[in-house]
Amino acid sequence: MPEAPAGLEPSAYPPWTGDVTRVPYWVYREPALLKTEQQRVFEGPVWNFLCLESEIPESGDWRATQLGQMPVVVARGADGSIAAFENRCAHRGALICLDNAGKGAKDFQCVYHAWRYDLHGNLASVAFQRGVNGKGGMPADFRLSDHGPRKLRVTTLLGLVFATLHDDTPDIETFIGVEVLAQMRRIIGDRQVEIIGRFTEVLPNNWKMYAENVRDSYHASLLHLFFATFRINRLSQGGGLIISPNGGCSVSSSIAPDAKDDPAYAGMRSAQDDYQLEDRGLIDVVDEHPDRIRQQIITVFPNFAMQKTQNAMAMRFFVPDGVDRTRLEWIYFGYADDTEAMRKRRMRHLNLGGPAGFVSMEDGCIGNFVERGIATAEADTSIVAMGGSGTETQQTRATEAAVRGFWALWRRMVAL
């Protein structure tokens, strides 16, 4: 992993003593830390998720997104290539693109003073550059090629578009790691994916709390009572964690047991014995691969996750919106060649995830419970010691190794 780029002086912050089994609460609450994270994490040697290739299939198709708090435009050029650049006019800093997405654009024009950019983010023209009737205008030595928004280095993987601002970011396969990448291929493989729904929600907590949450396999059957009530998920099932060499990317998998493989499962008590599902189709699963994996969550540092729960598939992309606010986007997808029956099954199972999902609903509020609980505890620390102190792959989900892996990589980048 390359050295972190220059940023704010780490000595300006309280010390982090000890290892990643003790996370100081001030790291969630220090407003100035957002600038350091923007410089050293999001603009550092990482790959940031931007969009799916299928969202920008034709020349001139584009989408607005974010690299941390930096607004970004990703666009398909006339030659079929994908470019990404800062969504900021070189003139006075206004957004170049105001909408979330568009199709068939020939170029982009800032609404403020009509400075125009091509599909690769190059400044193409300046309104009244030569003035009017020989008066005014830009200086004679002004060159369009000398000005423009920052451009990102773009790569694609399995139909997903990622970008980095750092020259020394390793190739994406190395960054994600061979074993984690294999599980991404398990879900997407060589099939074309198709977006079938999306939601955006605002979480009342620091973005790193959600980065922990998607890596925290310990809480799944404890916080999410739907899992326990309908006997879908428990920690004693088969499965475990895979963690990349850099610590920041991971896979959590749970394997569905049956009475033959796990006699105790047949007698497992539900959390609410008197609860029944009116529509059992919500947990009617087709083993598509087949490998009996019923839930899998894959993370890519710093702020991307992909999951398959039952037959529902989704991506989660989250960015800071202030020190105690996070904007989370859910992107639900299926395969373009899904049968009608499978697509209906996926749509039913999507009710498990998202802002009001039977499973994911609790994740939308638990971060704020932490925010409120640590309001005056900046000098204290959380305990992240389940499963030991390491960040290695483990054959159990009763561990916080992936959470520790996130913090280990974060600390190296932020230099704390």
Image: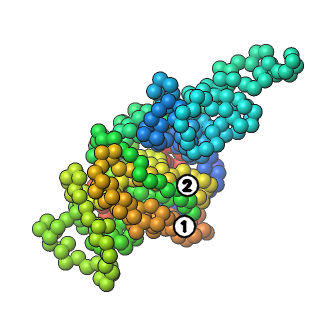
In the displayed orientation, state which residue is furthest to the left.
Answer: 260
Q: Residue at x 28, y 51 (%)?
A: 339
Q: For residue 219, which quarter of the picture?
A: bottom left
**How many discs mark residues in the rendered view?**
2
Give the color scheme: rainbow, by chain, secondary structure or one colour: rainbow
Residue occupying the point 57% across, 45% down: 100
Say left or right for 343 vs 264: right
Is the residue 103 above or below the residue 15 in the image? Answer: above
- Dot 1 and dot 2 residues touching (CB under 8 Å): no
Dot 1, crowdedness within 10 Å: few (<14), some or many (≥20)? some
Q: Residue 86 location, x and y as percent?
A: 60, 36
At label 2, the amino acid type is: Arg
Q: Is residue 76 above or below residue 325?
A: above
Disc 1 to disc 2, how far (Cα)?
A: 14 Å
Residue 351 sits in quarter? bottom left
- Residue 292: quadrant of the picture: bottom left
Q: Which residue is mark 1?
A: 368
Residue 70 can be seen, yes or no? no
Amino acid tagged 1: Asn
Secondary structure of the residue carrying tag 1 is: helix
Q: Residue at x 54, y 33 (%)?
A: 104
Name the mark on residue 327.
Answer: 2
Residue found at the very far bottom of the displayed protein: 274
Measuring from the top left, give residue 325's x and y in whole percent.
Answer: 59, 58
Residue at position x 85%, y 21% from top? 132
Label 2 neighbour load within 10 Å: few <14, some 14-19, many 20+ = some
Q: Position of residue 368 (x, y in %)?
A: 54, 67
Quadrant location of the N terminus in the rendered image: top left
| Front-most of residues 126 and 59 | 59
User: Where is residue 413 drawn, in percent x and y?
Assistant: 50, 43
